[in-house]
Amino acid sequence: MRQHLTGHTQTTSRMPNVKLVLNQEYDSLAKAREVERKIKKLKRKDYIDKMVQERYIRMV
């Protein structure tokens, strides 16, 4: 998160108000990035809203 806030991440460096709404740990960076890619591909906002509301990501 620190990298996002200090401008190390190009995408979020242009966003003025970045807010962490969900945090989940994974066994490896590769697995975390795989889940992140899947979330970014979701087209239905209600899926993402449900993940945030339940505070859990159900992706294998």
Image (tube, rainbow, N blue to C red):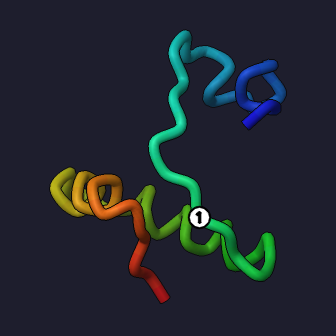
Please tell me which residue is depicted at 44% across the width and 56% down the height of the picture: 40
Between 60 and 43, the one lying in front of the other is 60
The x, y position of residue 59, in whole percent, is 44, 81
Q: Is residue 29 above or below residue 40?
A: below
Task: Please identify the quarter of the rendering in which residue 11 is found.
Answer: top right
Q: Nearer the viewer, residue 31 or 52?
A: 52
Could you tell me residue 55's position as x and y percent? 39, 60
Give the class, few, some or many, for how many residues have Cα within 10 Å of label 1's Cα (few <14, many ≥20): few
- Quarter holding the N terminus is top right
Left or right of 60 in this view: 29: right
- Given the current orientation, which residue lies at the most extreme bottom position? 60
Going by the numbered disc 1, the residue's amino acid type is: Gln
Residue at horizontal 61%, vertical 74%? 34
Q: Is residue 46 left or right of residue 57?
A: left
Where does label 1 land, which residue? 24
Which percent across, then down, holds residue 9? 75, 32
**Mark 1 secondary-structure assignment:** loop
Residue at 72%, 22% in the rendered image: 5
- Residue 30 versus residue 41 in the image, above or below: below
Q: Give the image location of residue 35, x and y in percent.
A: 55, 71
* Quarter of the figure with residue 4: top right
The total of numbered circles placed on residues is 1
Q: Residue furthest top?
A: 16
Image side of residue 10 versus residue 15, left or right: right
Most foreground residue, 32 or 43? 32
Residue located 81% across and 32% down the image: 3
Q: Is residue 27 above or below residue 33?
A: below
